[in-house]
Amino acid sequence: MRRSAEVTAHVFFWIVFTLFVFMLSKIYLQAKPDAEFSRHLYYVVFQELVMGLILFYTTYLGIAMTRGRNRRKLVLAAILFVMLLFFAYPATRFGIWQVMSSLIPHILVIFLAVVFRRFSDSVKLEKEKQLLLLQNTQSELALLKLQVSPHFLFNTLNNIDYLISHDTVKASNSISKLGEILRYMLYDAKIEKIPLSAELRHIEDYIGLIRLRAFDPDYLKYRVTGQPGYLQIAPMLFLPLIENAYKHAAAKEGENVILIDIAIDGRSLRFVIDNEYDPLRRSGDPFPGGIGLNIVRRRLDLMYHGSHNFNVYRENNRYRIDVELKLDEY
Amino acid sequence: MKKSSEIFTHLILWVLFILLVFTYCKWYLLVNPEAPLARHLNYVVFLELVMGIIFFYTAFFGIRLTKGRKTNQVILASVLALLLLIFAYPAFSHGFWQVMSSIIPHVAFILLAVIFRKLSDSNKLTREKQII
């Protein structure tokens, strides 16, 4: 609830209070038209409003000042008690019900001020909760981004290590590509979202690294359909999926071991990655406890909540992940 | 706010309300001892209490049911408006201020119910904040 709603509640309360006093006075005057206050009804209503405001806001603001301090609470209670007596004093010469008709509404006003104070606190509480949620989300996203880099680096360095002993030219090219990718990670991917075109270039660079190692040129097939236009996406979102696909298909040889298909249609993006895997290698689960899949899932939940689909299929020794996203433009 | 203090707050509200109604009736009877309510004052106070409770708790529990749903909010508002008219109807034959004397306190109860609802929710909110 916003601050404006809190102010509206106060204003509405005083309008109802004024109407209530005015209505009671009118009814009283119908029964006794020659009552003393009949000549200055507005003044009486105004006086009641002022007394109500004094009692209400003394309590309302007083509670905020006395929080956690018992001595101050006692002082506030004493002040309110004196005020109640002071406002009721003129009625003492008219009788008990006149005194009560001053005391009880004023006690009610004090009670309502306490309620409104707590109401105000709950508004603050809600804001604090939303702020905490936002901070948590930001921290989690930052953490997830941090997790991507070591995961990626670990796999890539393993690749280069393999190439150094088998093909030094390819190893050199790999280091050059790795440099480009690291530059992208260090400088471009720091922001929350980047242009889709830049992300696609980054995926191509990474795929280039994988292809350098493969013997068969058709080991990995990569296809992009549609135009990225002005669409933007969370940086390195699909990278862990490609890393995992390669990790679990690295031992395989031949054509179409890994298939990556990216289709852009308007603001929709569909990313499908399909790879061979060895079901005997890890008791049928190609990603046991793998962080890659969890990272992607969590990032999708945080950044594309309610606007994405994430499906995993496993058939004929092939593992397929199908992600659909609704992107926005920059 | 704990559940027990929430219940206590509700009780104080109703005790103060009964005292208020009783005091104003007595105050009114001082200048108009022949008024019809003089013969069944306790019944009038009880009736006021029942009407207040109906308004307050219809709004108090209704708000929870309508959360985030426009159609339900419209239904609740219509139910409350209908109740206001039903309870104010007997006063129509007595004059404008008598009608207002039914409508204004009941509108105040609806406002209070909204605020009390918020207070009740803050209990849950505190727990959620602690979890976060």
Image (cartoon, helix red, strand yellow):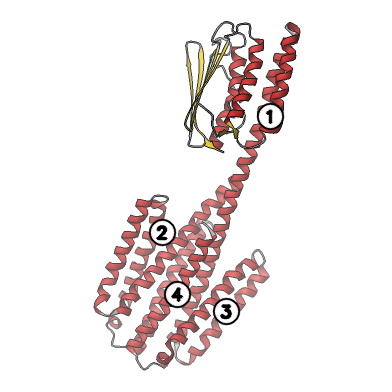
The residue under label 3 is: A81
Of residues B128 and B19, which is closer to you in this image? B128
Q: Earlier in the sequence, mark 1 or mark 4?
A: 4
* Residue A185: numbered disc: 1
Judged by depth in the image, the label closer to the viewer, 1 or 4, is 1
Q: Is residue B59 above or below residue A259?
A: below
Q: Amino acid at mark 4?
A: Phe
Q: Amino acid at mark 2?
A: Phe
The image position of residue A73, as x and y in percent, is: 63, 70
The image position of residue B114, as x and y in percent, is: 44, 61
Asked if labels 1 and 3 touch by Cβ distance under 8 angstroms, the answer is no
Q: Is residue B132 visible?
A: no
Q: Earlier in the sequence, mark 3 or mark 1?
A: 3
* Residue A17: numbered disc: 4
Asked if labels 4 and 2 touch by Cβ distance under 8 angstroms, the answer is no
The residue under label 2 is: B60
Of residues A102 and B38, which is closer to you in this image? A102
Q: Is residue B68 left or right of residue B4?
A: left
Q: Amino acid at mark 1?
A: Met
Q: Is residue A173 left or right of residue A102?
A: right
Q: Given the image, what chain letter belongs to the residue carrying mark 3?
A: A
Quadrant in the rendering for residue A301:
top right
Q: Are marks 3 and 1 on the same chain?
A: yes
Q: Amino acid at mark 3?
A: Phe
Q: Is residue A249 left or right of residue A26?
A: right
